[in-house]
Amino acid sequence: MRKIQMVDLLGQYHEIQEKIDVAVIDTIRSTAFINGPEVKAFQFELEDYLDVKHVIPCGNGTDALQVAMMALDLKQGDEIITPAFSYAAVAEVAALLGLIPVFADVDPDTFLIDTEEIRQLIGPKTKAIVPVHLFGQNADMAEILSIAEEFNLYVIEDAAQSIGSEYTFFDGSRKKSGTIGDFGCTSFFPSKNLGCYGDGGALMTNNDELAAKARMFVNHGQEKKYYHKTIGINSRLDSIQAAVLRCKLPHLDAYNARRFENALRYNQALSGIDKIATPCLSVDSSHAFHQYTLRVSAAWRNELKDHLNKNNIPCMIYYPVSLHKQEAYMDICRHGDLPVSEQLCKEVISLPMSPNLDSEQVDYITNSIKDFININSNYQEP
Ligand SMILES: *Cc1c(COP(=O)(O)O)cnc(C)c1O
């Protein structure tokens, strides 16, 4: 058996090595390192794939979120509502812009923002909802759009973990993750579902005016070179990364399908065990399985992690601390009770997941988990 990686990036590279090597060397020879034709071509191909009017490539997913907030004219003191159980990027850029992150609790089964909580947290300063499509599954966008309309709020989707997944509306129409709100933001960090070989990110929008503003903000606030209309930032996707992404984009659906197959194989082996909660599939979203995350008892979650590590199985705790308890944000955020987020931080464990994880490896991992459960059969259910 091959050594198990949390994300098998080398295995993925080997599958398309010839294409990648040629694309990277050609880009070097072109010397168009910044804003070259590869970046434009990738932009058009991603617009086409996502069926969205505008893709604005940028330096990383965190910048994409910041630029979305800047382009929507969010100002000091404005509030944005976002889940407490998530990565810190949304809270971080909000705080940098002087906005107040307002943390909502999440659904204990899907780990996605609780839309009832959103309603309760809306106040006079609330300007935007920033759902995070955590682990690859889309938040309840139909309800979020309807709340946004009712209270006149913007919607920024954090689609860093969900690219390629689809959300289905009541009428059966479907949209790709990140193309539903005023802005969608994604990341091409190497371990993401569509990852490059460095940093990268993009904003998505169907609004011409917002697209023009975002393009200006990622480029030093310039509309025309050396004419600075506003204070922007410098955030670019470089040409070599775009060349890598152009090689991978045609495979994204197949990559996500292989992640899904691995998730089903995990489910088959683990769903019969009453001490373990396998991931819950949402009714209105497909799942890109950026992460395969179990819930187990807080009493032995860390012991399970140690057991897997001892058996050469990497695993991760996404996320160990709820955002409202993070030192950086606890004094500047607003929130109510967050019992689910707090509990999840103690119970979740993410197993290795990538398109290049094979069935032999999945079986080895699930057998190792079963061994642990059998040895410790007196442990309590989650
Ligand atoms: C990775 C990630 C980001 C940030 O992307 P970077 O490209 O690393 O800046 C933001 N939000 C979520 C949910 C992420 O997983």
Image (cartoon, rainbow, N blue to C red):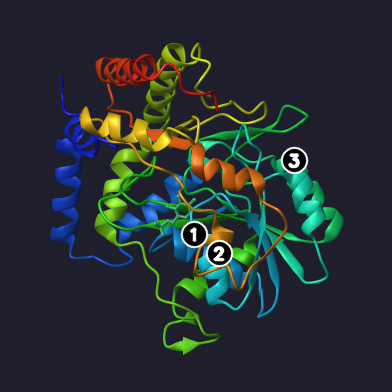
The three-letter code of the residue at mark 1 reads Ala
Report if residue 162 is visible in the image. Answer: no
What residue do we see at 30% from left, 21% from top? 365
| C-alpha gap between disc 3 and disc 1 | 25 Å
Mark 3 CB near ligand 1 (8 Å cut) = no
Which of these two is toward me, 59 or 277? 277
Query: Does any portion of residue 12 appear in the rendered image?
Result: yes
Is 70 located above or below residue 121 in the figure?
Answer: below
Q: Point out residue 188 in the picture as x, y percentages from the top left corner.
A: 37, 51
What kind of element bears circle 2?
A: helix
What's the amino acid at mark 2? Ala
Residue annotated with mark 2: 91
Disc 2 to disc 1: CB gap under 8 Å: yes
Sequence-earlier tag: 3 or 1: 1
Q: Front-most of 351 and 340? A: 340
Q: Which residue is mark 3?
A: 142
Q: Viewed as shown, does residue 131 lie left or right of 17?
A: right
How crowded pointer 1 is (Cα within 10 Å; few <14, some 14-19, many 20+) is rated as some
Determine the residue located farthest toward the right in the rendered image: 150
- For disc 1, the marked residue is 88
Q: Position of residue 20 (x, y in %)?
A: 20, 42
Residue at mark 2 to residue at mark 1: CA–CA distance: 5 Å
Q: Nearer the viewer, residue 229 or 126?
A: 126
Q: Quadrant of ligand 1?
A: bottom left
Among numbered discs 3 and 2, the one appearing first in the sequence: 2
Q: Vertical placement of 291 versus 380: above or below?
A: below
